[in-house]
Image (cartoon, grey):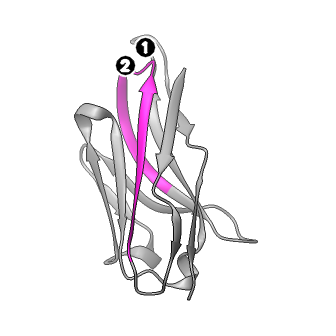
Amino acid sequence: QVQLVESGGGLVQPGGSLRLSCAASGSIYSIRGMGWHRQPPGKSRELVALLTDTDIIYGESVKGRFTISRYKAKNTVYLQMNTLNPEDTAVYYCVFDVRASRNSAYRDYWGQGTQVTVSS
């Protein structure tokens, strides 16, 4: 089993910054990708950023403001969020695409979610 622990959410004023972290632990043989999604109030979950060994993908609404990075040795992914605006208010979920053993298939594991609220 794989566990994800998120941290870093909170309340921030418009124009401010926050940094989210998500650490994966447990039965991890290999990681194919990691990333962040978010779910604004009353809306569907949407991609924020995705990172693999070869690609980085950002959602259109966060390009130029958010940066995804990782600390590979600690199976941790970060999301640096700058120039936040009220439309960024959402629950943010990290996701890891993990193979638990040499003989298992890759599957997605999700964090518990962390609230980010942008308001004055």
User: Would you identify the image quadrant in which residue 75 lies?
Assistant: top left
Quick check: is 115 in the magenta stretch? no
Q: Residue visible at 40% across and 81% down?
A: 16
Range of the magenta residues?
17-36
Q: Residue visible at 53% across and 36% down?
A: 108
Q: Nearer the viewer, residue 59 or 85?
A: 85
How many marks the image carries: the answer is 2
Mark 1 vs 2, N-terminal side = 2
Residue 29 - label: 2
**x, y (%) of residue 71?**
25, 42
Q: Residue visible at 43% across and 50% down?
A: 35
Quick check: is 35 in the magenta stretch? yes
Callout 1 secondary element: loop
Question: Are dots 1 and 2 in contact, CB under 8 Å?
Answer: yes
Q: Please determine whether, in this image, residue 41 is positioned above or below residue 100.
A: below
The chief SS type of the magenta part is strand
**x, y (%) of residue 18?**
40, 68
Pointer 1: what residue? 101
